[in-house]
Image (spheres, rainbow, N blue to C red):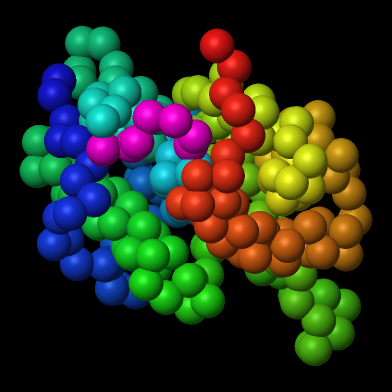
Amino acid sequence: MQYPHYNPESDNRPLSDEELDDLDELLAALPADAAMNIEALDGYLAGLLLTPGRPLAELPGEAWLPFVWGGDGDPDPAPFASGKQRKKVVMGVLRHLQSIATAWAQRPQAWEPIFSFADGEDEDTEYADAEDWAAGFLTAVALAPDAWTPWFDGGETAPLLAPIAALGSPDGALAEGSAEDRDAASRQIPDAMLALWKIRQSGRCPPQIG
């Protein structure tokens, strides 16, 4: 099964709030246990865009798109009810990917990742929890571990990635953390992502292995 490449020059429109909800529902209805929810997808796409080295536009779609729905099955190419449904999901993913890239390039301070929020004990308290987002980001990292290792070890980049490792790894430092600690780590992620994007675009990336 062939899937489209990501084209950073495409004129794909960002998803509206209603279309984003539709994509969330489509992903939630997929039968694969490993299918991403909309939060994990958002983190996954951010991680793909930030991956050092090879531009995402050079990576074949089949090398990264199937992870969104839990992989291409056998004998069916994907866990979709129809080719039309598959196409709708793929196009929704590509449009959301383009919207993240456009926001980072044109209006970074207006960009917001998609996190879960839970009410605290009083009405004025709300806790952010980026566990699923961070897990999605780490799925992108796992596709190019050698490229990412210098970033997780680098003096400038490691602190920016620390909240993601702490929240998204099953054995991360905040896997069993309090709501307050998880909230604090989650709220560091938006600024950290913009800082990493700026580093990547400036060419100040840590050296890669090999």
Residue 65: x percent and y percent?
31, 33
Residue 52: x percent and y percent?
49, 34
Residue 87: x percent and y percent?
14, 43
Does residue 163 lie above or below 30 as drawn?
Answer: below
Horizontal side of residue 193 vs 202, given as left or right: right
Horizontal side of residue 193 vs 129, given as left or right: left
Horizontal side of residue 42 vs 206, given as left or right: left
Residue 36 visible in the snapshot: no
Residue 112 visible in the snapshot: yes
Q: Is residue 22 within the magenta segment?
A: no
> Residue at horizontal 63%, vertical 34%?
206
Residue 103: x percent and y percent?
39, 68
Does residue 43 lie above or below 168 as drawn?
Answer: below
Magenta residue span = 51-57
> Residue at horizontal 56%, vertical 61%?
194
- Identify which residue, 86 or 141, lies in the foreground: 141
Place residue 101 in its image quadrant.
Answer: bottom left
Q: Quadrant of the C terminus?
A: top right
Does residue 200 lie above or below 169 as drawn?
Answer: below
